[in-house]
Every structure is written in C-alpha cells, then in structure tokens.
Amino acid sequence: MKHLRLKAAALAAALALLCAGCGAPASSAPSSSGGVSSAPASSAPASSAPAQETAALGEYRAMWVSYLEWESFDFSSEAAFAADADEMMQNCADMGLNVVIAQVRPFADALYPSELFPWSHLCTGVQGQDPGFDPLAILLDSAHSHGLELEAWLNPYRVRLNATRPAGELSADNPAVPHPEWVKTVGDGVYFDPSLPAVRQLITDGVVELLQNYPELDGIHFDDYFYPTTDASFDEAEYAASSSGLSLEEWRRENVNLLMRQVYDAVKAQDPTVRFGVSPQGNMDNNYNSQYSDVSLWMAEGGYVDYVLPQLYWGYGYTTGSGSTRYAFENISAEWAALERAPSVALYFGLGAYRIGDGDGGNYAAAQSGWQTGHTLADMVEDGRQLGADGYVLYRYDFLFKNGAWADLAAQEVENIRAANAE
C-alpha cells in the first residue's frame, strides 16, 4: 500500500516544481531531516502531503481491532495466530474496507519486540513474557497480502485501566516501574503524567521505534485517552512548579498539544508518507474540558495530525434524558463536519458497531429500533459521504463477525456496508 502513497508524494513534488517554475505557489513537503528521537515540539504548519495520501487511498474505510479482540486470538503458536489474522483480514477485505487499525500498545506494553515497552500480557497471560513470535509482523504481512493497509493503534498515556487490565503485575521493564515519578494513579488506574517532558519523549521514542522497525506500517493511531481526570490534585505539584501564566485547564491542554506536535514531527521526519491520526470522543465538550484535548485546534491548524476520527456512536434520533438531540447521529455528524479544517487534515467518522441490536441507551424507545434494522451503519456511511467526510471506521471487529447475541443483524450490517462500498 505504501508504494501508492510514495508515488503520489513523488507526483505532488514534481507538480510543485512545475508550479514553482511558472510562478504558482507550491505546497511545502514535510521535512525528512532532523533528529528523530529528539524531535522538537514545533508549531509549524503541516504540509499538504496527507491530503495527497488520502487521495491515493481513496475513501478511508477502516476497522478498529482492539485489545479485546486479542483476548480471543490464539497466541499458542505463530501458525495459530497467523490463521486468526488471515481470517480477520479476509473478512475486512471482503467488506470493501481498505484499512485495519490494530491496537498494539494498550497498556504501556507491546504486541511486538520493543526496547522501550514489555511484551503485552495479551500474548501469554504475563506481561513481559515473549510469545516466541512477532504478532505485529504477522498482522502487517496478513493485511498487505489481503490488499489492506495497517495502522498501529497506541494508547499514549494508559499504563493500567483497572485492577484486572492488564492482568497480573506490571513487568519489571514496564517504564512505569523503574520510573514511578512518571505516573499518576486515578482510582485503580495508572497513567503517565502528560505534563512531563520525559513522558512525551518516551511516547515519541516509542512511535519512532515502531516506524524504524516496521517501515511498512501505514499509520500511527492514538485513541481518546488523554487526561484521565479533572481533579486538580492530579498534577497540582507539577502545575505549581511550572510557574505557568496559563490556567490549569489551559496548561493541561498545552501539555497534550506539545505531545501531538512532537509525535507528528517525529512521524514526518521518519517517513512523510505515514499517517498520524487521533480518535477523540464524539462529545467535543468532553474532549476540551475533561480530557484537555483541543481537537478543534488540531483540525484547524496544521502540524498536529493528518486526520481526526471522532467516535460518533449515537444513533439516529438519539435523545438524552433532558430531551437534547445534540448527539443524535444526524446532528453530531453535521456539527463535526462544520468545523474548520485545514487542507492537510482529513475527517473520518467513527461508527459504533457495538450498538447493533443493543441500542445506545438513549431516551427514545421508538427510535432504538434503528439499531435492529440491519442497515443503520450503512446509512451512516452514506450520510457521512453527503456531509463531506473522507471516510469512516467501524468499532469494532468482533461486533460484526463474532456477535453471538445479534449474529444475524450483524451479518445484515456487514452485507449492507459491503453494498455501500461497491457503489
């Protein structure tokens, strides 16, 4: 897949030279020089390369594969894992998808050999234990053999979600263990402190390691876990020591901005054709005020991401207990589509396949039946196209192909999405 983007980038560079010769303005290309492991946090505008790459790919049609999928994969041998991977990739390709977003670092651990993070407990049941093969290499080979691109999905800050995930003790080589000063606890959860330069460097170095060891990767994907709390005590000491003239909320948002700029610069320095994107919550207020992620800024300005992928998991007609319909799919999708977006930033819609049959909990009993029609997701795909979205992603694989409770409905959704992709 990557060779297509390289050809597109080469063609764009040639056109830029021609334009320069005739007096027309030329788009700037991302720099491939500079120290990758110490990439600066730059606020320079992004190049137009991501738009060129999206055009080469066509409509972005993707599937999220989370750590929850890995819990049902067979890690007993390389052959067994490869068989599961091939079945998954074949199913995605048959739907007419072109990208798989595979979660390969969910808890400061890795589904690949790393000098920075321990092996994930998902591989063997014990964090830090080598499964004897490289799952990410298998996923890459399988995806590309089925005509799919593969993006590495990373959770930047999360070390532990709760007492059971990850299972067991953290490995001695989990960076949170030798560096307890890098982490904070929130309930049973453990998270890296976003305010620390050392943490930002660790996350950036982890991205660079991936791109250096897996040059065929098509993208790096961050999910929506940024600040885990609004509690002022979480980083009270760090905020006081910063002597920042910003409010606590502004300071936290700038800490996340610094990470996003630094990772973006590092990705482009390593390989300008690799996408870097993020999947924030669909509720923009939560992003800005609770997780301190200034997504509208990332969309409007270059230099943060190549794409934004909000999680629009509500159905048509969704109504809150107070009677608000702001988050009904037809309304929230239009709200995102109306946001200012730089030419270099694509917009994809995240669609909630996990709602099939079960609904979304909205206070609108009559409209809940929409999740039992077998074509709601396909309708959302079509409506996203009408709004000008550049593609969509389905959350997540198991709810379409291993949905025991609603298998028939899921199969109908798959067939209707396939038909929508064939148009």
Image: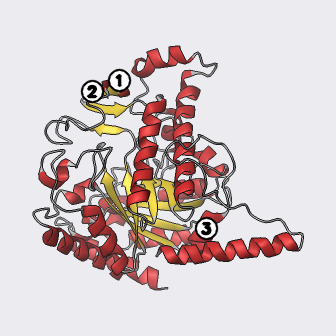
Q: Which mark is residue 181?
A: 1
Using the rendered image of the protein, determine whether residue 155 is visible from the camera's viewpoint: yes
Q: Position of residue 82 (x, y in %)?
A: 20, 72
Using the rendered image of the protein, determine whether residue 309 is visible from the camera's viewpoint: no
Task: Answer with mark 3 or mark 2, whichever residue precedes in sequence.
Answer: 2
Q: Tell me the crowding category of disc 1: few under 14, some 14 to 19, or many 20 or more residues within 10 angstroms, Cα based.
A: few
- Residue drawn 20% across and 68% down? 402
Query: Is label 3 in contact with label 2 (beta carbons under 8 Å)?
Result: no
- Residue drawn 17% across and 53% down? 130
Task: Answer with mark 1 or mark 2, whichever residue precedes in sequence.
Answer: 1
Instruction: Tell me the CA gap for discs 3 and 2.
Output: 41 Å
Q: Amino acid at mark 2?
A: Gly
Q: Amino acid at mark 3?
A: Gly
Q: Position of residue 24 (x, y in %)?
A: 86, 69
Task: Answer with mark 3 or mark 1, whichever residue precedes in sequence.
Answer: 1
Q: Secondary structure at mark 1?
A: helix
Q: Judge depth for marks 1 and 2 and give the one in front.
A: 1
Q: Where on the picture, by quarter, is residue 87? A: bottom left
Q: Secondary structure at mark 2?
A: loop
